Image (tube, rainbow, N blue to C red):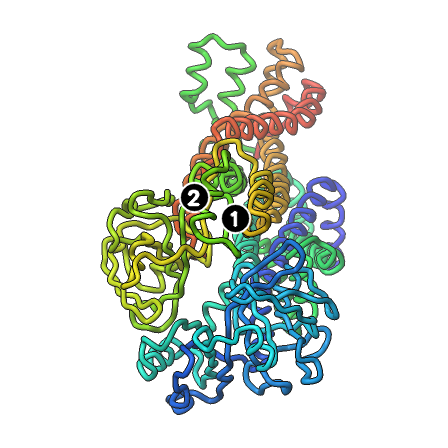
Amino acid sequence: MRALLRWVRADLRAHRGQAALMVLVTAVIAVSLILANALLRDAANPWQRIFLQSRGAHVWIHVRSGADTAPLTRLDGVTGVAGPYSTASADLVRGAEKVSLELRAAGPQLPSVARPLVRSGRWLDPARSDGIVLESSLARAMRADVGGTVTVRARDGATRTMRVLGVADSADQGSYPDWTPGLGWVLPTALDRVEPDPAHIQQAIGLRLRDPGSADFTAQQAVTTLGSGQVTQVTTWQQVRSAMGQDNRLLGLLLGVFGLVALVAAALATAGAAGGRVLAQVRDIAMLKTVGFTPAQVVRLFLYEHTALALAGMALGAGAASLFGPLLPGALGEAMGVWQAEPARAGALAATGAGVVLSIALATALPAWRAGRIPAAPTVRADRPASGISRLARLALLLKLPPALALGSRAAFHRPLRAGLTVARLAIPIMMITVALGSWATLDGFQDHPRQLGLAASLTARPSGIDDAAARRLLTEQPAVAAAYPGAEIPALVPGETTTITLRALGTADHPYPFALAAGHLIRDEDEAVAGQGALNLMHAKVGEWVRVTAGGTPHILHIVGRDIEPDHNGEMLSVDLGALAGPGGTPKAQYYALVLRPGANPTAVRTDLLAASHGRLDVRPVANPAAQLGLVRVVVVGLVGVLTLIGLAELVTATASGLRDHVRDLGVLRAMGLTPRQVTAIIVTSTALLTTAAVLAGTGLGVLLSNRLINMEGQASGVGAGIARMPAPETLLMAGAVAVAVAACVSVVPATRATRARITAALSANRT
């Protein structure tokens, strides 16, 4: 064992740069996988942690005032009930900000089921009848602190000033603004003062189930028991969990996919490096056999060496993630902070480390086995005659290129199998870099071309204290507004009545809204609709089918004629013409107007002009762009490109060393024939550059195909829908390929220059084994 360790130490000293690079690559891969694990766990943990602590309800049902909810407590599988609570719709106003709010009446005692978790301040107090407790994400968005005041505006325009008593977490609904309206709790007397009209009061009841997997079935039973005309909204725990962790899940999947692919690429690079060392050290290994080393000991020697490098890299990566992970900005730092406090952290860290080390060890197994088969007295093989020249070399000769380029093209593919393996190992990181560039291009598409991704409107305007005709006139008179589309949104029960989606009426028959369609066609008749991918998933429907939804107690039979790219509400939107909601009283009143601006118009300036022109009677807000919430993805993409670049560099070092070893005698012959050291260096650089060029072509082509597929799959899984992927610009791909080839050439210059400085007699006396 002592002899093994001494040999390993000597080998590592002889290849310090390569060993350090392998440790660094392994460490960075370990950090990526640890961050991915933390993000994926945190994607579900915010909801799961709050749900467990609050004994949350698995199904929430909103019903009309006066409906008898007592039968719901007797449904099979129901183990607890929250409510029923009286609720009313209002607006929360603080300064210039105004958001939609659901006021929920609650008592001074916290309930046993779906108990809000007060994080700061205190719960409702009968001594403060004007008090309100805000859900934490809503409080953060409105910058409402405990002890401050907010204004609550009822549907009739009357306002009430309320004191913020506390801020609480809740698993009843997703985080604001991804989930609207926001949630606030008040005393029943306060709710009666804000909304005195009983016709505008609803009830919310939560059901806690013995089997969480039966949430859809229980929701259907509840709707059947109460009657679909009494139910206005149904929400299950799966919808809330998905909405809470969407952004973190995307980052986690991105890091996880790249980390795993990078691990495979690193394992292949390690296998190539180990194989190169075996070939370069045949005489040393034979000497070890001569002094008594067994084949098993030689195999263990290489396994110990590379496993030690993997362990060092894993330890370095785990330490860096633990120390600096919580300091990272945004979701990454928050997820790492939460993950480190979990009891399961040690097990996840051990599993990640075991996977990384085992992958590196398995990659080293084949080269180590080949080393064990080397005899104690290896025979010196005579140089084999040249196997002919490749087509590329023939082309170089036909074009009468300089001798260095012609000979370099021959050297690149002189050994087809080894060249193919080198190209494959280099193509993997290039492929994933192309995928990263595709992710970047997709984010740029969201920002630069929002209309193509379902964001035709830049602003929304809601009349407040102004009649509809006056609001429409103000909007149409604004020169920067190209079109104002009236819209309304109401919850609708999906077929099967297990949950609700948002039924959005937007545009009119004479003035249809320009939805961004990925399939089908736009709305032409009042019974036609376009749906987001999330809505299609919930309804188990496809484009071309007819569906029946119930909105406001009224059934609607709609023909889905298209699928639009829908970034709002996780894609759970079914869009129709405003006339489709027409009842006996005619076309419903618009709740808001979606404003499409003229090219070049500044949304901020238009918003300011509209607020001034309406004297504050129009609530004008910018349309949220998902790209604004995914800015951290760009940072992650840059980091992943750096990781993949390191892996590529490690493989380039191995490829250059192998090329020099294969052609050491050739270099001596070429110098003896009169080629200058500069020309010999050009041969080696050309060989490496050609291998890299082949890898760039293969990796870029596969990366473009994989990028579109992965991004569209993520879009489909998130509810936005496929069709959002954008291919990197051709000039970007060309520049990335040129940089890769240039870096490969630069990496090979140093060892090539050293090789050409060797004496001709030493090169000619070298034997290949």
Q: Is residue 544 or residue 9 the one in the foreground?
A: 544
Q: Residue at x 51, y 84 (%)?
A: 82
Q: Is residue 647 visible?
A: no
Residue named by callout 2: 484
Q: Quadrant of residue 292?
A: bottom right
Q: Quarter-wise, where is residue 572 in the image? A: bottom left
Residue at the farthest bottom position:
74
Residue at screen point 45% across, 58% down: 570
Residue 412 image position (x, y, % from top left):
51, 26
Residue 88 % position (x, y): 51, 72
Residue for badge 1: 623
Q: Nearer the viewer, residue 390 or 294?
A: 390
Near mark 1 (Cα within 10 A), the count class, few <14, some 14-19 or many ≥20, is: some
- Please state, as top left, top right, bottom left or bottom right, where the C terminus lies in the image: top right
Q: Where is 584 relative to 616, above or below?
A: below
Label 1 element class: loop
Mark 2 in CB contact with mark 1 (< 8 angstroms): no
Q: Residue at x 60, y 34 (%)?
A: 652
Q: Residues within 10 Å of mark 2 (few under 14, many from 20)?
A: many
> Is residue 22 visible from the viewing direction of this image?
yes
State which mark lies toward you, 2 or 1: 2
